[in-house]
Amino acid sequence: MGILEIKQLYKSFGCHEVLNGLDMDVPEHSIFGFVGQNGAGKTTTMKIILGLLKPDSGSVTVCGEKVTYGETKTNRNIGFLPDVPEFYGYMNPMEYLKLCGEITGLTKYKIELKCEELLELVGLKYEKKKKIGGFSRGMKQRLGIAQALLNEPKLLICDEPTSALDPVGRKEILDILSAAKGKTTILFSTHILSDVERVCDRIAVLHGGKIALSGTLSEMKDRYRHNGFVLEFENEKEACFFENAEELKKPEISLSRNKNVVTVLMTGRDMDGHFLLCILSQKRITPLKFTVMEPTLESLFMEVVR
């Protein structure tokens, strides 16, 4: 059973339908990439999971317990990192985490232990006595992760945690999330596809109010692998000779050429690399390179969104 299960979730604001039968299952100890364009409904989904927004219909369960709007008992299993975490600037990280620990009802001993451990995890061990007001955005984001992990949640929800950061800050956050994977399950909402490819082991693409694509990256690539090949020839003359082969003039084959490189996409069932190798053999042409095209997360995403 998944840590988070969403069944047939619907939500509209006036006549604008945001979620339209959303189904999602997040397995334990995964970093689950929740991907969609801005405005696709990712934040709406998270607010419903946290019990802050009432769905029109459907159900959400966290650790087997049903989420009820306006009730927070399921949130004891959840840590939440908003896209812009807010802090008291006059406090230092240690004071702030102690305050959060007291609010969540942790014992003094447990708070001390957890604060030290988490500040080490997020790389703020040497800044624990500095005022948060002077922190960079990346440092605040890291402190936000420490705060979200304080009550040892079974599910950590991150809403666009890297979108406002520079490449260094983004790498730091992604490394921390990878390190936290053993301790918790992470739902990582973002529209930055390269971040997803770096850290997520499962992915769901939200489009049109429901999940348009989901699975591990390799499963999705296998499912959407077209018969695409890239052939690089010694010169343009050879590339043209190959491109103009009679055998390739079929409706299920599309060709494009850029100088001495020919890209072939085939949708015919019996068409594969052997078919092209036969043509090369007949024409007595040896390409410099013959590669199978791999779908990328970006090409899959564009296909779905289109």
Image: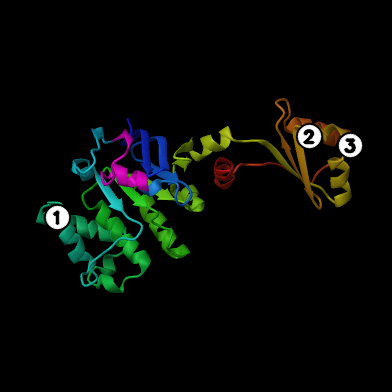
The residue identified by callout 1 is 103
Label 1: element kind: helix
Residue 44 x/y as whole percent:
36, 46
Residue type at tag 1: Ile
Residue 81 x/y as whole percent:
31, 54
Instruction: Give the class, few, some or many, for how many residues have Cα within 10 Å of label 1's Cα (few <14, many ≥20).
Output: few
What range is drawn magenta here?
44-60
Judge whether residue 264 can be spotted in this image: yes
Label 3: element kind: helix
Report the residue at 15% width, 58% height from top: 112
Residue 46 position (above or below residue 129) = above
The residue identified by callout 2 is 276
Which residue, as the protein is rendered here, is positioned at the far top?
270
Residue 48 in magenta stretch: yes
The residue identified by callout 3 is 283
Instruction: Give the class, few, some or many, for how many residues have Cα within 10 Å of label 2's Cα (few <14, many ≥20).
Output: some
Label 3 vs label 2: CA separation?
A: 11 Å
Sequence-first tag of 3 and 2:
2
Label 2: element kind: helix
Residue 57 x/y as whole percent:
32, 34
Q: Is residue 117 left or right of residue 18?
A: left
